[in-house]
Image (spheres, grey):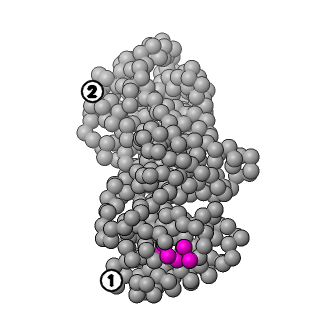
Amino acid sequence: MCQIGWGTRCKFGAYYHDRERIKRWPDKSTVMARQPDVVLVRYGEIFLKGPQVREGLESLLASQISRCLERVGITHKVKRMRGRMVVKTPDPRGACEAVRNIFGIVSVSPSFTVEKALADIAACAVEIARASIAEGETFAIDANRADKTFPLTSQDINSTVGESVRVATDATVDLGDPDLTIGIDIRDDAYLYIEVVDGPGGLPLGTSGRGLCLFSGGIDSPVACYLMMKRGCEQELLYFDNQPFADSTTLDRAVSVARRLRAHSCSSHIKMLVAPHGHSLEDITRQAPRGLTCTLCKRMMVRVADAVASERGLDVIINGSSLSQVCSQTMPNLKLTILASRTPVLMPLISFDKEEIVAISRRIGTFDASIAPATECSAVPDQPRTKPTLAEVMDAESKIDVNGLVGTTLDGIREIEL
């Protein structure tokens, strides 16, 4: 029989973005002997790959789970199986909180392991229900028979276990919108759970190359960085320090945002580079037409990023631009910016509107830090050009020592410890 001391109620299948949710699981009601003993880890896109690729991705994900848990000091053993991983640990709640941000993981559930026998499964479900269903609440059973040698179908399991729970608790079955759903996953053993906490999905970090993100610390660039990380692309951050056209508060804000972003790379280290950019802006504002300041500034940044990416062996430059959101992100300006780089420039937010970007920023926990008070760049002209031509830009840059400015910037780059 499965005995538990944990009975937080939730609807199975609901996903949560609240980072404090696991920490708020109460130890309440009936005091019993056993807590959840494993974490059931689900992954999605990985399962769709061919056998050889899938094997490599599963192995990498398992190793990242282990590194993440080792980093926070949680004893564990990771077991791989078809479509799932099971983490055996004395601290499943802490393990869930630790691994939930690992890219490649779709969701995690603290789970109870029982023998793969209908009587044991039903007994455990009854114990969970007694500790979790309040008077007047409804329930459902949701079985997944991954082991097709198990003699009952998923529907048979639902019906039989559901009847045991109904008789034991007097609760009503509701298959549409139950107050509690007990999930059952039948594999090498049977795993029962009532919590499903979402992960980011995507692919494990390190499976899709390495990028250099142009990182301002505003709302957009951390979201662009996050979305590339979700696709398996490891990131380094490049921040341009505009002093004296801005003060140190902008750098402080960027560092704060970067630290929050780093929370999503539990198994990897994100480096943040700071490049001096004020001297370039001084030359641009003094030598070039004021309407071209933003265009020339962006091109200078991309040239520096191109050199940094080449030096550090990075594959792409990540730009947080959204088409036509601001003057420097019109189609003509974006085209002129990209032309300044030999390294490919990817813009994962190009078709997103601001509300969509803000929603992701809130979800990943960077929004509040991104809107912290900081000075804005004072070099922005009153009437920036939105449709400059390449000839105009080339003429303006001919009056500036572009190579010298890039060299000075590269010499002044330093790394910030996150």
> In the image shown, does 403 or 247 lie closer to the viewer?
247
Q: Is residue 390 visible?
A: yes
Among numbered discs 1 and 2, the one appearing first in the sequence: 1
Q: Residues within 10 Å of mark 2 (few under 14, many from 20)?
A: some
Which mark is nearer the camera, 1 or 2? 1
Give the structural element (helix, strand or loop) at label 1: loop
Q: Position of residue 117 (x, y in %)?
A: 60, 73
> In the image shown, does 156 or 393 lie closer to the viewer?
156
How far apart are labels 1 and 2 at the CA level? 59 Å
Which mark identifies residue 335? none
Give the structural element (helix, strand or loop) at label 2: loop
Question: Image height check: is 329 above or below 299?
Answer: below
Residue where numbered disc 1 is placed: 135
Q: Position of residue 100 (x, y in %)?
A: 46, 51
In the rendered structure, are the residues bearing label 1 and label 2 in contact, judged by CB atoms less than 8 Å apart?
no
Q: Position of residue 195 (x, y in %)?
A: 44, 65
Please check the rendered image and state whether residue 396 is part of the magenta-colored stretch, yes or no.
no
Please give the range of residues in magenta.
Answer: 119-125
Q: Name the quarter where the C terminus is drawn.
A: top left
Residue where numbered disc 2 is placed: 247
Question: Image height check: is 61 above or below 315?
Answer: below
Q: Amino acid at mark 2?
A: Asp
Q: Is residue 15 visible?
A: no
Q: Amino acid at mark 1?
A: Glu
